[in-house]
Image (cartoon, grey):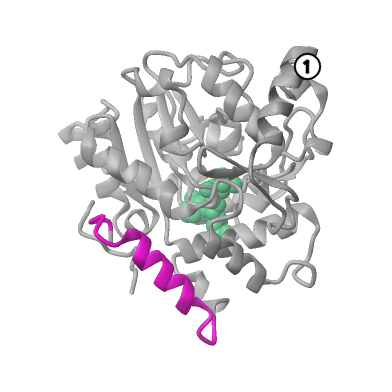
């Protein structure tokens, strides 16, 4: 059985998933301000590209998806991805935090930020106490799609759900480091299905789990297919270990301090012996834990405002935070076909 636990190696409206929000921004929900500049030429260009793409409307909370460079997006996201590919310029010291939606993006943001800023903030001044991790680290295909500098440039992080093969060349060709987090695909599916239902208001009677599962098996949902998303970063991490660090959600759950030290070293901010003796990695793990973040006032009752998008309740980004919650949903053999597909897709990769 495909296992994402205890390995030896150490993502219109949604596509946040946040973006499934897998924030697959629906065109009707996006304002002119957040679309690509709407000169007639630009509009024609994107309409032309999109009209030639394969379409599917089976992921009902989002509506129509388009296949661009082998992955599926809502129409506005296709535009944003192309715009980012054409114009995004990273800062030389940026670290790019990558993930498929619902794989642990917010957690990765919190950890990476806390590691790098540990000498500037303390337990009472950490911005995570007052802000959702998504407010601290912006998304390339949302906030930064049209303006690379639409961010706090003192925070050296950019996040994205864009697959490795579609990342802007400016990132690939730079010295920017990349950290990818992956998660058991069955937990990703359950998290994604729950989140999109909640954000879209389309309930399980209109979008049953069986339909979501079928779409996942076909790879047709925002930023799918999952296997290609994961394998793109996995292979890059093997080929360019100095540039791409691959982390598993389940490994972080099992041995947080070890992987926080790995991340710190990779990002060029290793812990000193004194820091380790004083338990600095453990403190960061504790600060960024689901239990701690989800109980903060900002994450219980705060709202996340993105220009011209619906307002999100911060708590929707903190559901259960567990490894293996799929077992409460994929009962009566529902996972058999899914497991077979994943095993076949990941076979020979050395990942599982
Ligand atoms: P996004 O794609 O909308 O950015 P993302 O942060 O990648 O979502 O994933 C959300 C999942 O991470 C949720 O999982 P669940 O639905 O299975 O509960 C969320 O609860 C979980 N999560 C958020 N913060 C943490 C954390 N600090 N530790 C562990 N899991 C977390």
Q: Is residue 251 above or below residue 36?
A: below
Image height of 99 relative to 241, above or below: below
Residue 309 horizontal/vertical position (percent): 77, 35
Residue that label 1 marks: 38
Which element type, helix, strand or loop, lies under badge 1?
A: loop
Against 151, residue 254 (above or below) is below
Q: Quadrant of the N terminus?
A: bottom left
- 338 drawn magenta: yes
In the foreground, 326 or 87: 87
In the picture, the quarter occupied by the C terminus is: bottom left
Q: Is residue 1 left or right of residue 310?
A: left
Q: Is residue 33 magenta?
A: no
- At x 55%, y 27%, the residue is 140
Location of residue 48 by image quarter: top right
Q: Residue at x 37, y 28 (%)?
A: 116
User: Where does the magenta region start and end?
Assistant: 331-351
Q: Residue at x 41, y 40 (%)?
A: 111
Q: Position of residue 103 (x, y in %)?
A: 48, 52
The answer to whether residue 260 shows anywhere in this view is no
Residue 254 appears left or right of 73: left
Question: Nearest the camera: 288 or 224?
Answer: 224
Q: Position of residue 293 (x, y in %)?
A: 54, 48
């Amino acid at each position: 059985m495909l296992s994402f636990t205890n390995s030896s190696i150490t993502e219109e409206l949604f596509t946040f998933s946040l973006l499934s929000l897998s924030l697959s921004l629906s065109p009707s929900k996006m304002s002119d301000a957040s679309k690509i500049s709407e000169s007639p030429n630009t509009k024609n260009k994107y309409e032309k590209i999109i009209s030639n793409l394969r379409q599917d409307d089976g992921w009902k909370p989002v509506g129509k998806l388009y296949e661009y460079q082998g992955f599926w997006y809502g129409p506005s996201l296709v535009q944003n991805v192309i715009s980012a590919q054409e114009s995004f310029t990273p800062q030389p010291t940026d670290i790019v935090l990558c993930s498929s939606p619902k794989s642990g993006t917010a957690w990765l943001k919190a950890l990476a930020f806390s590691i790098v800023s540990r000498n500037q903030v303390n337990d009472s001044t950490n911005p995570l106490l007052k802000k959702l991790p998504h407010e601290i680290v912006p998304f390339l295909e949302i906030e930064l799609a049209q303006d690379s500098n639409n961010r706090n440039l003192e925070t050296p992080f950019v996040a994205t759900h864009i697959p490795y093969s579609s990342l802007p060349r400016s990132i690939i060709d730079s010295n920017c480091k990349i950290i990818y987090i992956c998660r058991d695909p069955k937990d990703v599916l359950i998290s994604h299905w729950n989140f999109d239902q909640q954000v879209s208001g389309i309930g399980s009677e209109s979008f049953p789990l069986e339909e979501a599962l079928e779409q996942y098996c076909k790879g047709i949902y925002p930023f799918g297919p999952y296997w290609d998303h994961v394998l793109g970063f996995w292979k890059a991490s093997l080929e360019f270990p100095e540039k791409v660090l691959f982390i598993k959600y389940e490994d972080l759950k099992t041995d947080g301090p070890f992987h926080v030290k790995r991340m710190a070293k990779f990002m060029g901010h290793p812990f000193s012996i004194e820091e380790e003796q004083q338990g600095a990695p453990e403190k960061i793990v504790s600060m960024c834990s689901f239990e701690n973040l989800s109980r903060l006032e900002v994450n219980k009752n705060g709202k996340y405002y993105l220009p011209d998008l619906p307002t999100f309740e911060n708590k929707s980004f903190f559901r259960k935070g567990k490894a293996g919650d799929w077992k409460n949903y994929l009962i009566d053999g529902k996972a058999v076909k899914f497991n077979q597909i994943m095993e076949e897709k990941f076979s020979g990769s050395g990942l599982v």
